[in-house]
């Protein structure tokens, strides 16, 4: 197997970080293709510079291992989600920090359940163009439009950043449940309200990052692109602030739908790698090399 995220390949036992490919996209309502997202990110990651100039570390030196992709069960969203939950739980119980790569956004529900079971309570930072708060979509509660409805009903505290497609019903639910709500139009006009976002979150946070939160000018390869999204810099600044002040218990990056635009896949890989570097610094696995700024 070729190395991913840098030049080394860390064996499972030595790895602190497990990248978990979840190529499940059977819930997609518009353009399918997110099943090819994890492989595309891992392939693009081979082209990254291992040393990250901004962080002053080479995140791969924290030890990153790409796990086997979670298989899906044709015709059964329920069974597929059960497998995702079990695989994530296995890595968490082995003490690994798990970064899942989707796949469609429905995978966040079993991933969050696994983290809750292994690691205890946390709040959720949901970065997305869409609220994903439909009680069901096209007749399924396992839809990629529904994971946060289910999580909110299960009592999770959710903070949503970057939204620009929200139904009246979803907006009513956001208000009723008191979710953190930071729509893209506000961010475009006023900048990223980092203090407010951090204040809305608890001390421990799970991050679910839908690549369509980014503006299509930087991230065209998603199933449902929408204009007026976050810049790459805003995504990095949001994650940097989060890792500085919170314990990030886990992450998923979902909905990359490769469509031949390799720059989008590189962008996705770079953001994931940057997030792993932030974790490595926050956890004390690596120290910033002060000479490199
Ligand atoms: Mn989403």
Image: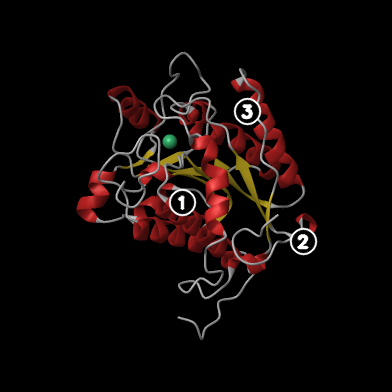
Residue placed under numbered mark 1 in the picture: 265
| Image height of 249 relative to 137, above or below | below
Q: Residue 290: x and y, percent?
A: 52, 83
Looking at this view, is 226 or 96 the one in front?
226
Q: Quadrant of the N terminus?
A: bottom right
Q: Residue furthest top?
A: 139
Q: Residue furthest bottom?
A: 291
Report if residue 14 is visible in the image: yes
Disc 1 secondary structure class: helix
Q: Is residue 280 left or right of residue 195?
A: right
User: What whole-number distance in Å separates the C-alpha atoms at marks 2 and 1?
Assistant: 27 Å
- Residue at image x 68%, y 40%? 88
Q: Quadrant of the C terminus?
A: bottom left
| Image height of 77 relative to 196, above or below | above
User: Crowdedness of circle 1 by 10 Å Cα count: few (<14), some, many (20+)?
Assistant: many
Discs 3, 1 touching: Cβ within 8 Å: no
Residue placed under numbered mark 2 in the picture: 14
- Residue at image x 47%, y 57%? 271
- Residue at image x 53%, y 25%? 26
User: What whole-number distance in Å separates the C-alpha atoms at marks 3 and 1?
Assistant: 25 Å
The mark nearer the N terminus, 3 or 2, is 2
Q: Residue 27: x and y, percent?
A: 50, 25
User: Crowdedness of circle 3 by 10 Å Cα count: few (<14), some, many (20+)?
Assistant: many
User: Crowdedness of circle 2 by 10 Å Cα count: few (<14), some, many (20+)?
Assistant: few
Figure quadrant of residue 220: top left
Q: Is residue 210 left or right of residue 282?
A: left
Q: Residue 173: x and y, percent?
A: 36, 26
Q: Nearer the viewer, mark 3 or mark 1?
A: 1
Total count of labels: 3
């Amino acid at each position: 197997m070729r190395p991913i995220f840098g030049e080394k390949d860390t064996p499972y036992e030595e790895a602190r970080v497990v990248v978990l490919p979840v190529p499940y996209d059977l819930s997609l309502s518009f353009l399918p293709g997110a099943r090819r997202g994890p492989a595309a990110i891992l392939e693009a990651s081979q082209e990254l510079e291992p040393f990250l100039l901004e962080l002053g570390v080479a995140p791969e030196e924290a030890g990153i291992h790409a796990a086997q992709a979670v298989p899906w069960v044709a015709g059964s969203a329920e069974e597929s989600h059960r497998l995702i939950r079990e695989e994530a739980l296995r890595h968490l119980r082995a003490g690994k920090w798990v970064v899942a790569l989707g796949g469609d956004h429905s995978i966040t529900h079993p991933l969050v359940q696994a983290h809750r079971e292994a690691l205890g309570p946390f709040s959720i930072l949901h970065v997305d163009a869409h609220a994903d708060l439909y009680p069901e979509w096209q007749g399924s509660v396992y839809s990629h439009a529904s994971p946060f409805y289910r999580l909110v009903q299960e009592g999770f505290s959710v903070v949503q950043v970057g939204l620009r497609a929200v139904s009246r019903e979803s907006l009513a639910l956001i208000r009723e449940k008191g979710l953190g709500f930071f729509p893209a139009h506000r961010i475009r006009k006023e900048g990223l309200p980092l203090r407010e976002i951090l204040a809305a979150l608890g001390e421990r946070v799970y991050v679910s990052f839908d690549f369509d939160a980014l503006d299509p000018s930087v991230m065209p390869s998603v199933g449902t692109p929408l204009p007026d999204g976050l810049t790459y810099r805003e995504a990095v600044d949001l994650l940097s602030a989060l890792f500085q002040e919170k314990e990030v218990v886990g992450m998923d990056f979902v909905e990359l739908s490769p469509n031949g635009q390799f720059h989008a896949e590189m962008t996705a890989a770079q953001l994931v790698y940057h997030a792993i570097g932030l974790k490595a610094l926050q956890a004390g696995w690596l120290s910033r090399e002060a000479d490199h700024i």
